[in-house]
Image (cartoon, coloured by chain):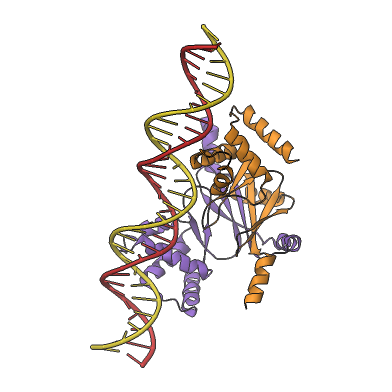
Chain colours: A purple, B orange, C red, D yellow
Amino acid sequence: MSEVHLKDALETLKSTGVRITPQRHAILEFMIHSTAHPTADDIYRALEKTFPNMSVATVYNNLRVFKSAGLVKELTYGDSSSRFDFVTNDHYHVICNDCGKIVDFHYPGLDEVEQLASHVTGFQVDYHRLEIYGTCQQCSGKSAQAQ
Amino acid sequence: MSEVHLKDALETLKSTGVRITPQRHAILEFMIHSTAHPTADDIYRALEKTFPNMSVATVYNNLRVFKSAGLVKELTYGDSSSRFDFVTNDHYHVICNDCGKIVDFHYPGLDEVEQLASHVTGFQVDYHRLEIYGTCQQCSGKSAQAQ
DNA sequence: TTCTTACATTATAATCGTTATAATTAGTGT
DNA sequence: ACACTAATTATAACGATTATAATGTAAGAA
């Protein structure tokens, strides 16, 4: 299944005239297999074994390339650095305020909300972003013990 | 109405032992009357006439104070700097990908989504964040003319 | 009032994520 | 193999935010 994703992604890139380099291949592969919503630096460090000369700039550059090809989404929060998410099907994110863990949550798109927003504001609506914040089980357990 | 918000906000701060300084008063007042979701720098520049010696750090410090008091929310996007939003009643944001304008969109909270997410992930859910992206009327008009 | 103490503010330096630049390398088509 | 274009690398620069140290200011006790 992830092989399909990778193949599709590479196809998408090729069709827009973007070259498939070993670095790009590796970054995509890593993102597809990762469930951790990695930062640019996470990716960089994960791949520096196989690409000892790779630059951080390459990671950032390619994440931007992937983003504008619609393969990857950037997730930003108030603190620290952006996280990147390989786009598969519609899902939202549930985020732990304690440890920062991000869990995928599959749910049908909120089409009615988009429509209403478009009607009320006059915007031409393209997409939306929903994030749910709270405390994960592990962290709930921890704080319960601590008290 | 905004006077009520200001009064409430000051009360909230006092009750948690935070001193009301002229700078804090001014920042809050500015945020309440602003509809533009200002950045820290916006606030700094708006107030440097009345507080010529105020430091940017003061703005950042106090935004953090307000945030942890629940008076203010921080909105982050991939690019540039955070924007800050005085918390009133439940509303979401509709954001123009072209000019960056942010418009408030009132809509009842997505309680069912929160409940389902909690059930599926095991998280103790606290709140959520929904943002709707698209193109505002002005920018739609512009691009139509440009083509 | 004056002293004391704790908190706020200021000015500035430091940090850190990200982006730009210039030079080098590597694909792709002829 | 050659020329051309795009990608990568190394590094410098940037900009937003945070930390630090010094100074100022408010509130309570004596």
Vertical order, D8 against B45 (above or below): below
Q: Position of residue A45 (x, y in %)?
A: 36, 56
Quarter of the figure that contains the C terminus of chain A = top right
Vertical order, A68 against A17 (above or below): above
**Residue A30 visible here:** no
Q: Position of residue A54 (x, y in %)?
A: 33, 63
* Residue D9 relative to residue A42: left or right: left
Q: Position of residue B105 (x, y in %)?
A: 71, 54
Vertical order, A131 against B20 (above or below): below
Which residue is at 67% across, 70% downward?
B140
* Residue in front for this viewpoint, A71 or A61: A61
* Residue A9 relative to residue D8: left or right: right
Vertical order, A9 against B119 (above or below): below
- Image quarter of residue B11: top right
Which residue is at 52% across, 42% downward?
B60
* Residue in front for this viewpoint, A62 or A88: A62
**Residue A76 visible here:** yes
